[in-house]
Amino acid sequence: MEQDKTIGAITWMDITVPEADGLRDFYKNVVGWNTMDISMGDYNDYCMVSPSDNVVRSGVCHAAGANAGMPAAWIMYINVANLDESIAKVIAGGGEVVNGPRKMGEKARYCIIKDPAGAFCGLFDHGEE
């Protein structure tokens, strides 16, 4: 699946909770999503998949390991050009980094922030110049 790398694009949504299995089943029932297991070693997180086109739409994750400190809220991820510069602007603007920055793959990095109003979102840098 081709990733949208447009700066400012919202490209992913996920939620992290203590009991991901139950929430996975809740959304399977309510929305009609299918699921794809993602091995995290000792447990699985889940990609939620549209049944009509088999496209991965979001994630449901366990609040474990690196995700232990994540807020139990749906978090959207927004592409940024430079994660370090964006983090500096978050802090200067009265926000805070609540998780990360963390690596994803070889080049990509992301973090979760809380804005001055108390809302959470993720900032995602694909790591390409």
Image (cartoon, rainbow, N blue to C red):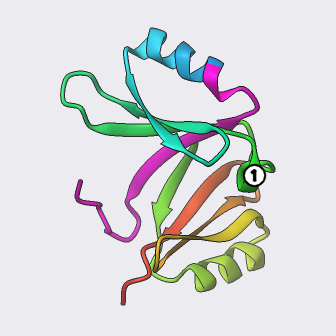
Q: Quadrant of residue 50?
A: top left
Q: Is residue 118 visible?
A: no
Q: Residue at x 57, y 79 (%)?
A: 83
Q: Position of residue 60 (x, y in %)?
A: 56, 35
Amino acid, disc 1 = Gly
Q: Is residue 71 visible?
A: yes
Look at the numbered disc 1 and give the secondary structure of its residue. Answer: helix
Relative to 9, is 44 above or below?
above
| Farthest-out residue, left | 53
Q: Is residue 81 left or right of residue 63?
A: left
**Which quadrant does the C terminus fall into?**
bottom left
Q: Position of residue 38 (x, y in %)?
A: 49, 42
| Farthest-out residue, bottom | 129
Relative to 117, is 37 above or below?
above
Q: Position of residue 48 (x, y in %)?
A: 42, 31
Q: Which residues are magenta?
A: 1-21
Q: Quadrant of residue 74?
A: top right
Q: Quadrant of residue 25?
A: top right
Q: Residue at x 51, y 67 (%)?
A: 124
Q: Residue at x 29, y 61 (%)?
A: 4
For label 1, the residue is 65
Q: Position of residue 117 (x, y in %)?
A: 75, 51
Q: Is residue 22 left or right of residue 26?
A: right
Q: Is residue 57 left or right of residue 122?
A: left
Relative to 94, is 83 above or below?
below
Q: Residue at x 81, y 50 (%)?
A: 69
